[in-house]
Amino acid sequence: MKVAAIFDDGKAGLVEKPDLTPKEDFVVVKVHAVPMCTEYKGFKAGRPGEGFGHEAAGEVVEVAQPGQVKVGDRVVVQCGSGCGRCPMCLIGEVIHCQSGRRARAVTGQQTFGTYSQYVLKQDWLLSPIPDGISYEHASLACCGVGPTFGAMQQMQVDALDTVLITGLGPVGLGGVINGHYRNARVIGIESHPYRANLAKELGAEAVLNPNDEDVLEQIMDLTNGVGVDKAIDCSGASQAHRLMVDALRRKGQACFIGEGGEFPLGASRDMIRKGLVLRGSWHYNLGGYPKLIKVIQESAEQLGKFITHTFPMSQVQQAWELQTTGECGKVVMDPWA
């Protein structure tokens, strides 16, 4: 099978690896759609390696024993690799499992992420794709629309809310789609013109530039001086974290999705006197998958705009080069093209 790799000279391409064999509850999935996330940062830094990717959609082609899926099932390959037994796994919070159960430890085979023609995955971490949904759209149930769906579920975002989303890369743009689906008013924060314009196409009412000195005042003007009801950071930037907290109304709520550094937070000033609820939100509870796939099913037109580029996996270098420019929304690869 073919997998994507970065070579010592900083170039990227495909390499041949041994085919995979199912064992116990690890099944073989033929990958049909690979959404690209932050792997481009390794390419930009010139770090050689292989085993990229953590999100995919495909078809079950081989199983070792009867289980949760059968050959021919169309599935979303969920992020993470839980143990299946701990309290976090049992309540659907697989992403927070502290033990994990890796394919290599169980099957003895080296795996290579989802930038690959095939993957090994535990059958209970494969979510069914309903008829009528393409592999490309279904694959967005991972990092495309999944993290912001989980955040909005926790905050119970609805049509009465104004939601601020800081950072309109692929995850933040997925947040615009989720907010629009819930009929919430969405205000975005993004400096890249391409992504700011795309966010407006996807349903953001306004997109402000974080480099404006009066960006907080602009947010307050848009909310009659009160502040936003809910906020989600998808940038990981300390400046955005601070802005998000300042922009929240009294008793507002925020979720931190973007991985980043530290920022100043005052227990009295920010938490006690404003009565804020601040959460870390990495993914979504797998029990919410049926609702998420319904969002995907009913947002086909927006998802068609959200996926701005598709590439054959043989052109992974060109795909990564595009991502480094920021002139794209979600990019999806086909391992077989």
Image: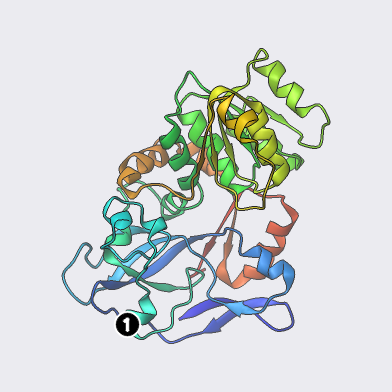
Is residue 192 toward the left or the right of residue 114 in the image? right
**Where is residue 15, by image quadrant?**
bottom right
Element under label 1? helix
Residue 120, compared with residue 73, is above or below; it is below
Judge left or right: residue 23 versus residue 233.
left
**Residue that appears at 18% across and 66% down:** 67
Instruction: Please state which of residues 19 and 230 is positioned toward the viewer in this rendering.
Output: 230
Q: Position of residue 174 (x, y in %)?
A: 54, 42
Residue 60 sits above or below residue 13 on the image: above
Q: How is the image coloured?
A: rainbow
Compare residues 106 and 276 and report the one nearer the observer: 276
Q: Residues within 10 Å of mark 1 (few under 14, many from 20)?
A: some
Quadrant position of the N terminus in the picture: bottom left
* Residue 59: percent from left, percent from top: 33, 64
Left or right of 148 in this view: 258: right
Residue at image x 34%, y 46%? Answer: 289
Q: Which residue is mark 1?
A: 107
Mark 1 belongs to which amino acid?
A: Thr
Query: x, y (%) of residue 183?
Result: 48, 24
Which residue, as the protein is rendered here, is positioned at the far left? 66
Q: Residue at x 66, y 12 (%)?
A: 224
